[in-house]
Image (spheres, rainbow, N blue to C red):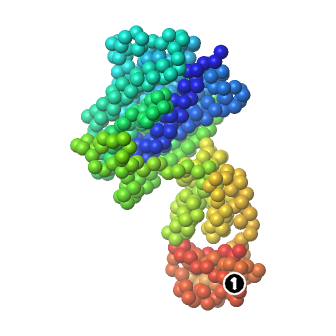
Amino acid sequence: MSDPSLVRFRVAVQGALAHLESRRQEINDLNVFPVADGDTGDNMALTLKAVLAELDRLAELHDRSIDEIGRDEIVETVARAALLGARGNSGVILSQLIRGAAEELVSRPGELVDPVLLGAAFATAAQRAYASVREPAEGTMLTVMRDMATSIAHDLAHLPEDQRRLAAAAAPEQQNLLIAAALERAIVAGEASVQRGPELLPALREAGVVDAGGYGVIIIFAGIVAALKGTDAPELDHYAPARITHPEHASETYQYCTNFAVTGQGLEASRYVPKLEEIGDSVLVVGDHATLKVHVHTDDPEQATLVFAGAGEVSRLDVADMHAQVVEREARLSAGGSNGHANGNGNGAVTGNGGALAVTHAEHQHACGALAVATGAGLVALFESLGARVLDGGPTLNPSTMEILAGIHDVPAEEVVVLPNSANVFMAAERAAELSEKVVRVVPSRSQQAGLSAAFALNAERGAAENADAMQAALDAVRTGGVAPAARQDPDGRFAVGDAVGYVGEELVAWGEPRSTLEAVLGQLSADAELVTCIEGEGAPLDDAAVAALAPAGVELELEDGGQPSWWWLLAAE
C-alpha cells in the first residue's frame, strides 16, 4: 500500500539539505576550536546527502516509487546511511537524531505523521543524541534539540484535538500545513535555545558566537518548513564569525579529525571508547552490534583504526587536518571573505530582512577535483591556477599517507585524482586512495613539471576515471628534465658538491657549469619538441634572459617562477 508519508520524508530531506547548503559557510565560520570541528556545516550537509542518496538508491533498486517500498525497509537503510555518511561531531550527532526519529516512525506503522507523532520523534531523537555523547555539553546542538522537543510537548498539552491529530482521511496538504505549523513553533524555541548557548558554554561566550551545530539544526528544520509549505524558509538570525582571541582554542586541538566505520559482529561501542581517549579527544562511537561509526580528534589516525584490529573491517576512513582548517579560515576571514554579517548587536547576531543580507556560500562542489603534491610558492600557484588543490610536500616532497588522506578530504568533490609528482610518494598516495571513502585515482606523475602537464587535462565535470585517463595521456606526451646543484661529490670524479647536474628523465646527461649543463639538457629535450617549459627554482644562477638565450632554434621557451628548493630548473617538453 502506498505511504504518502515517505514521499513527504524525501521532500523534507531535500528541502533541509537545500537550505543548509545555502548557509553552510556561515555555519562553518561559527566554529570554536577545540569545542567543535572546523567544518560543521559541511559535515551536517554530508549526512543529509547520504540520506537523500540512499532514498534514491532504494527507489532505483526496487524500480518502485519511494512511497511503495515500506517504512521498515526505508527507516533501517536510511538510519544506516546517515550513520555511515556522517563526519565530524556534528555529523555523527545529526545521524543519531535521524536514527532516533526514524525509530519512532517505524514503531507506529500506518499512523499519519502529525504533531503527536512529531513530538514523539523529537523526544526519541534528542534522547538518542544525548546517549551517543559520553560527556554531553549544554549549549550545543544537543540542548537545542531537547528544547525543541520540550516545546512541541508543551504545545501538544495546549492545542485542540484537531491541531494535534489527523484523521485517516486527511488531505496531504492539510497534513503538510499542520506539520509545518508545529515545526515553526519549535524553531522559535530552537532559536531561543541557540541564543542561550553562550550562557551555558564559556567557549562560545569567549568567542562571541552561538553553537554551530545548534544553529545548523534550526536551519535544517527551517528548510523542511519551506519544503512542506512551498514557500521561503522562516527568517533566522545571522551571526558573525567566531573571534579566535584565545591561543588555546587552536594550539590544544589534536591535528586530525578522524572518521571511519567498523563492520563486524558483536560490536560494543563502549568497549572501544577508553582506548580512543588515550590517543585523542572528542570521541564518539555509535551504532549497533554490526556497524559502528567512529569519530575522534587525534594526531595518529592510523593508531585509531588499530584500536579495532581483529574486531571487524575498517572502511570509509576520512581524515581532515583541523590545523589547516584554522589557518585557511583565518586567512579567508582576514581577507574579507566572511559570511557577510559583521555588523551585529551585542551578541553578534544580525536579524535577516527577507534575504537582503547576503551569505557567502560554501565552495562549489564539482564532480571531480585534483590533489597535487607540490613545493615552492610559484609551483603551488601554477597548480592552483589549473584548478588543483595543493598539498605542500615540504622540501623533500614526501608527505605521509595521512597528510594525503587529509588533502583528499579537503578537495571539494566526491571524486578525486591525485598527482603525487614524485616516485617516492606513489605508495603513500595509493594507500590514501584505498583508505578514502571518496572515489580516488592516482596518476603516476614522477615530477612536478610532469604533474603540471597532467593537470592541464583536468575537467571538473568528468569523473575521476576519465580524468585519470586524460592525465595519463598527457604524461605519455611529455618529456621531462631538470638541472640541480649536486648534493654530493660524484664517486667517479665527474662533479663536486655544488656543481650543476642535468637530467633527462631520470638519466644523468650533463654536469659542470650551470650554463653549459642547462644548454645540454635543453638540447636533448628539445628534439622534436615545439614547446619547452622552464620552471625556475630557488637560487637559480642564471637570469631569465640568459636562460632564454640557450633555447634551441625553432623551439618556444616558456619561463615560469616555481620557487622550488633543490632544483634550479625543472623542464618539460611537449
Q: Quadrant of the C terminus?
A: bottom right
Residue 265, position in %: x, y? 63, 25
Amino acid type shown at disc 1: Val
Residue 74, position in %: x, y? 61, 24
Seen in the picture, residue 223 relative to 516 is either above or below; the reply is above
Residue closer to the observer: 139 or 308: 139
Q: Is residue 427 visible?
A: no
Q: Is residue 280 left or right of residue 302?
A: left
Q: Which residue is mark 1?
A: 555
Seen in the picture, residue 56 relative to 110 is either above or below; the reply is below
Q: Quadrant of the N terminus?
A: top right
Residue 457, position in %: x, y? 67, 62
**Helix, strand or loop status at disc 1:** loop
Residue 100, position in %: x, y? 49, 22
Identity of the residue drawn at 63% across and 70% down: 449
Seen in the picture, residue 446 relative to 320 is either above or below; the reply is below
Q: Is residue 527 visible?
A: yes
Identity of the residue drawn at 36% across and 37% down: 236
Q: Quadrant of residue 7?
A: top right
Identity of the residue drawn at 64% across and 82% down: 557
Identify the residue at the far left of this view. 346
Identity of the residue drawn at 66% across and 68% down: 453
Seen in the picture, residue 415 relative to 159 is either above or below; the reply is below
Residue closer to the observer: 371 or 131: 371
